[in-house]
Image (cartoon, rainbow, N blue to C red):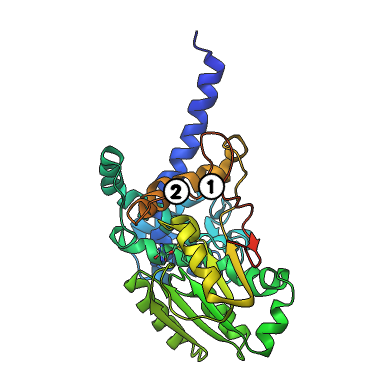
Amino acid sequence: MTDPAKLDSLVSRLVDELGGAASVALVRIGDQLGLYTALQKQPMNSHELAQAAGIAERYAREWLAQQAASGYIAYDEASGKFALSPEQAMIFAEEDSPFYMMGAFDAIAANLEGQAKVQAAFRTGAGVEWGAHSACLFCAVARFLRPGYRSNLVSSWLPALDGMVERLQAGARVADVGCGHGVSTALMAAAFPQSEFVGFDFHIGSVEAARRHAADHRVGNIRFEVATAKTFPGTDYDLVTFFDCLHDMGDPIGAAAHVRRSLNPNGTWMIVEPQAGDTLAENLNPVGRLWYAASTMVCVPTSLSQEVGLALGAQGARRGSGRCSPRVASRACVARRTRL
Ligand SMILES: C[S@@+](CC[C@H](N)C(=O)[O-])C[C@H]1O[C@@H](n2cnc3c(N)ncnc32)[C@H](O)[C@@H]1O
């Protein structure tokens, strides 16, 4: 029998969630038209925002109301003005904040754009190539992951590898595989000017974007090449890094074997993967929910489009048995001198 209290609670929750989903387009409008950065400067009413951002007042008024109802900006009834609190600014306006989340909104938009292709693949079991996803996916991924790399990569993830910081300071050879737009590669190259960095990715558009990004930031000890994880050139690397890409690969085991051959005897393979528990039950939480969505729409289709098509998924390759293989434990999961 239907439990009215349970039904009521589920409907209430969905009203809230649909409000979030409906906000994706509005948040991206606020980002792209500079509305959050304008509001960050000072509290404003709709006329002042329209003037500051060069938009029509009627649209500004409606957008402000929706954002205040969402709790994304603050509203002061006495003055009739809207503002960004310091916390809201960290999420919506400050690109260098560790909590900047605009890339996540871009990624959700890319998921929605990808529906037709992925939906068709549900029937056939075929993959969807990384390059065939919505054009904004590649920028969204780079933008989404950048705050985490900026806050952690040089300050805590690399120091977690025994002796690696000293080796990078002295001069090491590093390959960043599946580098995408090269955010991680550029951060490492800027921090360790004595070392040589090469970023590899099989998606030419991403490699071109990475080259532009490095040129804009005048990082000299870095280059980017188109190559797959199983065929990237070079040997004698001191460090090979895989940031958020092993699970996207069709043949992660073949990639691992290639990494093993490309490292020098003291070399290190660093793998960073989305945080996950080992079992489905452990991942039934808000974070697992988002990662499973990304996994269904992007990671699994990408892997299935490649040879072998192992399709580990973004949540640590959980199989029907409830076991996880290979074990991919946390966002800073490090495999040192992995024996293969
Ligand atoms: C989620 S993105 C991560 C990009 C980048 N590492 C970052 O953290 O911003 C996954 C990347 O893996 C790359 N990729 C997937 N399969 C690959 C393969 N077999 N060989 C090389 N790159 C691959 C994709 O092109 C994409 O750039």
Please, what is the three-letter code of the amino acid marked with disc 1?
A: Gln
Q: Is residue 281 visible?
A: yes
Q: Position of residue 186 (x, y in %)?
A: 52, 80
Q: In the image, is 107 to the left or to the right of 175?
A: left
* Residue ranking furthest to the top: 1
Q: Quadrant of residue 213?
A: bottom left
The answer for how far apart the CA atoms under marks 1 and 2 are is 8 Å
The mark found on residue 184 in the picture is: none
Q: Amino acid at mark 2?
A: Ser
Q: How many marks?
A: 2
Q: Secondary structure at mark 1?
A: loop
- Is 248 situated left or right of 169 in this image? left
Quadrant location, the C terminus: bottom right
Mark number, residue 295: 2
The residue beneath circle 1 is: 315
Residues 34 and 308: in front is 308
